[in-house]
Image: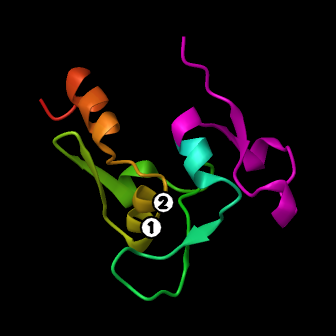
Amino acid sequence: MLRFPVDRIIAGQHRGEYTEENTALACPYCNGKKGPNIASVVPGTQGPPVALFNPRTERWADHFAFEGARVVGLTSTGEATASLLAMNAEERLELRSARGYGA
């Protein structure tokens, strides 16, 4: 069974605390890719870094959409987050396809 750890959105090294406002359930794969990052650059650019998606203060649909099984960033935050978290890695696309995303 897949378990979802409680992740600090802003990591401890950036003074993020274990509060309701700063925690969210995280996919273990995404959590491992995110690490302590709070920002990243948009792929194909030289920066500046943009804040990663915050599930406590932002709506998923404002930053992401599905094109088939692929997650597409609609904003710079969405693009940077999707890239850093490797949301479109081959095994993730296969899993989404098998579960009917993009059908």
Q: Is residue 59 visible?
A: yes
* Residues tagged 2 and 1 counted as in contact (Cβ below 8 A): yes
Give the amino acid type for the residue marked by disc 1 in the picture: Ala
Mark 2–mark 1 Cα distance, whole angstroms, equals 6 Å
Residue 34, placed above or below residue 68: below
Quarter of the figure with the N terminus: top right
What is the span of residues highlighted in magenta in the rendered image?
1-29
At x 37% / y 69%, what residue is drawn? 75
- Residue 28 included in the magenta stretch of the image: yes
Identify the residue at the far top of this view: 1
At x 60% / y 37%, what residue is drawn? 26
Residue 87, placed above or below residue 69: below
At x 61% / y 43%, what residue is drawn? 31
**Of the two numbered discs 2 and 1 in the rendering, the one whose residue sits closer to the viewer:** 2
- Residue 73 in percent (x, y) is at 33, 61
At x 46% / y 68%, what residue is drawn? 77
In the rendered structure, the answer to whether residue 97 lies left or right of residue 50 reads left
- Residue 21 included in the magenta stretch of the image: yes
Give the amino acid type for the residue marked by disc 2 in the picture: Leu
Quarter of the figure with the C terminus: top left
- Residue 11 in percent (x, y) is at 77, 56
Within-10-Å neighbours for mark 1: few <14, some 14–19, many 20+: many
Q: Nearer the viewer, residue 99 or 62?
A: 99
What is the number of the mark on residue 80?
1
Quadrant in the rendering for residue 102: top left
What is the number of the mark on residue 84?
2
- Residue 98 in percent (x, y) is at 22, 22
